[in-house]
Image (cartoon, rainbow, N blue to C red):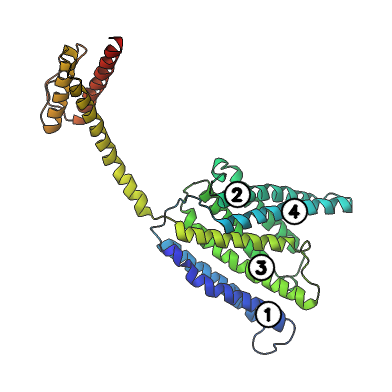
Amino acid sequence: MKSKLSWIPFIPVVFAAVFLRIYQVLFIDSGVDKGFLDSGLVSIIFVGSIVALFVILAIFCFADKKTAPEYDIGRNIFAGFFAILTGALLLTDAVLLVMQMISAGFFDWISGIDVLLSLAGGAMIFVMGISSLTGYNRAKHMPFLMLLPTVWCCGRLVLTFASYTAISPAAKDMSDLVYMVFATLFLFNVSMVYIKLKGKNPVKACFLYGLPAVVVIFAYAGALFASLIQSGQGVDFFANIRVFEFLSFALYILFFLLELTAGAKGKQKEDALAVDTAPQKEQQLHVSHENARQSLKSGQAADPETARAEAIMAKVEEADRKKNDPVDYVGYYNRDVQDQTKKDDGLSDYASKLDDIDRLILELSENDHKE
């Protein structure tokens, strides 16, 4: 399955992206490096590496014709832990935002919407974490609610973009917007995996959107923390809680994709099961009727009813041996004499005889109980 090859370009790109962004903050923006690289070139290399990674992953996904679109969620302690942590951070973020509005003494509609989305999305991401941590997929029983994480991330993207419109792009690192785009698409597809909705192929789409999201947020967080440490401010948890939300969710993506890499099934197995279903059912049908015939013979009863049943079974066996010949058959319940013309549909004739056999067996069993 070519989707599993996505790790090959991801590993060098993620290390290169994190290194470039930290190098940019520590050496280029501070003026230490005055000739080797400039800030604009680093940004071009960073964006180009993300685009190149996405294109390569898209090629792998397009060429992968074997990965099945469904996956049974298994027990994944690390993915479950970071999903639960992400949900807890989202709930904490919502509470802090409410406390800020109360202390400020005014209600902001944008912040209010953000609070509602964080509560809803955090709760369902928490459910996803419980499902992965325990191995029992609770999320599949609430398909509509599983859209809430996607709605949360999409809403956070719109609200963050709106807050950046008044800021110059040169004065603010807007890589988090790119991360939210990939995270929204990943959440939409991973929700389909949890609720077992096939779609086009959400399993492959998780690789396509999840790995670039991890690269972007790792580079963004590395550059931000390096900048804070260099300035002597330190990393304040509550002031940067949303960055920790992104990091926690990125780690969930990473470990969940590792689970998919190890456990994703191929389409060939599903097709083979589908092909084997019909012969197995037919074989079970023949076995059941053979058991019924043996049970009638084992009775050794001399009454006319048993004799009639054995005669019918003999007719059925003769019909199996001579599929192309019409079978003379007289129903047990005084039916009119059927036409003796050849029948093109042998299956319907065979099925009608089996119905009579079932009714006969039922009546024989009832007679035994009466006696």
Tag 2 near tag 1, CB within 8 Å: no
- Mark 2 and mark 3 lie on one chain; the one further toward the N terminus is 2
Name the residue type under label 3: Ser
| C-alpha separation, residue under disc 2 versus residue under disc 3 | 30 Å
The disc, 3 or 4, on the residue closer to the chain's N-terminal end is 4
Where in the figure is residue 333, as x and y percent of width and height?
Answer: 22, 12
- N-terminal of the pair, mark 4 or mark 2, is 4
* Of the image marks 1 and 4, the number of the one nearer the N terminus: 1
Q: Is residue 140 left or right of residue 353?
A: right
Report, in whole angstroms, how far the alpha carbon at label 3 lies from the one at label 1: 14 Å
Q: Looking at this view, is 366 or 350 the one in front?
A: 366
Question: Disc 4 vs disc 2: which is toward the camera?
Answer: 2
63 and 354: which is toward the camera: 354
The amino acid type of the residue labelled 2 equals: Ile
Q: CA distance from mark 3 to mark 4?
A: 23 Å
Q: Which residue is mark 1?
A: 24
The 10 Å Cα crowd at callout 2, few under 14, some 14 to 19, many 20 or more, is many
- Number of marks in the rendered image: 4
Q: Crowding near pointer 4: few (<14 within 10 Å), some, many (20+)?
A: some
- Amino acid, disc 1: Gln
Q: Which residue is mark 2?
A: 130
Q: Is residue 187 above or below residue 167?
A: above
Q: Position of residue 7 (x, y in %)?
A: 49, 68
- Residue 14 lies, with reference to residue 335, above or below; the image says below
Say whether residue 68 is left or right of residue 274.
right
